[in-house]
Image (cartoon, rainbow, N blue to C red):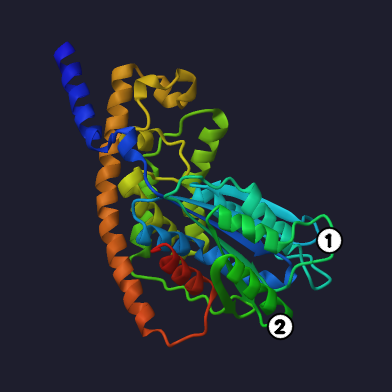
Amino acid sequence: MKSITMLRALAFAALIAPLAIPSAARARPAVEVAFVLDTTGSMSGLIEGAKRKIWSIATAIVDSNPGADIRMGLVAYRDIGDDYVTRNVELTPDIQDLYARLLELQARGGGDWPESVNEALDVAVNKLRWSKDGDTRRIVFLVGDAPPHMDYAQDTKYPTTLSVARQKDIIVNAVQAGAARDTERVWHEIADGGRGRYIPIPQDGGQIVVIETPYDQDIIILQNRINGTVIPYGPAPLQKRTEEQTRQLSKVAAAAPAAASDMASYINKRARTSSEAVTGGGDLVSDVMAGRQKLDQVKDEELPDNLRALPAEQRTAKIEAEMNQRKALNEKLATLVKQRDAYLFAQRDKQPKQASSFDREVEATLKAQLKR
């Protein structure tokens, strides 16, 4: 019996050994991207487009920087007198949570023409928790159609904020929805002061092209099977969040198959370095595969009930089985994702030349700025 247990332990160690990278070697460069988004009533078309394309934007970052840690954040803003002035999502590797928060945004409010742009930029540059590591790329996209209120005495004005951004090595891009001349002047100043790009797009964000592919349904099915290998662990709220994220793909697929396929493609590409099935942690299988956690060091109370009920040897066997299953499914999924990428590239090549749009301009800007 002891020899069988020993053999199982050795096999388990061999399975995870290639993924258990020493901490010094595991440190990777990071990419941090924050969107500062006007959510007043006039921005409804662009916001709905952003909801559909956030996963393809995240995937563009992965394609340009396959080994990087990726964190994204959001500062939604309106104006004094609206439901809120700013509402933010901290920079996070949990893109599924960011996506869920983005889906909750509705374009409302606004009245007078200027908005609280100054406060929103100040929050993005000075309140979000940017990493201080020298290898990190830090990029902001200000997206709006109206100029800032310059008459709010309590605000830090944008020239001061941009000076801090330069000190922190944060690039600030200015995306103008619509063609208002007063906004154009300020957005040019913000892009110049932020060492970024001035990006004019139509008021509604431009024509967001959503291409469905012959591979989408199979990709969604495979990702759902991968999600079935997730074992939530940790404090109860984290377990609940992880469970909800395993169900998110199915909900998105019912409403927007292309977006669900985008999500699965992003997670699969990240899985090559992170072993993730969902973003943001909380999955025991992922953490053991990547060497971030050891099963015997997890407290019993932080295990799900079905795993906690098993003796130690059976717990190991369960994790081993899920790891093997996930590895095989991810290999199949990677083949489909590669075929889907080729199909999308060919279809986009056939599309007629179009005016600029939010997603295409952001993706092109990221590709250029992440090469620096």
Residue name at image x 65 percent, y 48 percent: 127
Residue 1 visible in the picture: no
Q: Secondary structure at mark 2?
A: helix
Q: Amino acid at mark 1?
A: Tyr
Q: Name the outermost residue toward the top.
A: 2
The residue at the point 72 percent across, 63 percent down is: 117
Residue 152 is labelled as 1
Is 173 positioned to the left or the right of 298 in the image?
A: right
Residue in the foreground of this view, choosing between 366 and 332: 366
User: In this rendering, would 248 be left or right of 337?
Assistant: right
User: Looking at this view, is 190 or 78 the one in front?
Assistant: 190
Closer to the chain start, of discs 2 and 1, is 1
Mark number for residue 181? 2
Q: Please state, as top left, top right, bottom left or bottom right, where the N terminus lies in the image.
A: top left
Given residues 14 and 308, the one toward you in this image is 14
Residue 334 screen position, x and y as percent: 28, 56
C-alpha distance separating marks 2 and 1 = 21 Å
The answer to which of 25 and 238 lies nearer the viewer is 25
Q: Position of residue 231 (x, y in %)?
A: 41, 34
Residue 140, horizontal then vertical, whole percent: 56, 60
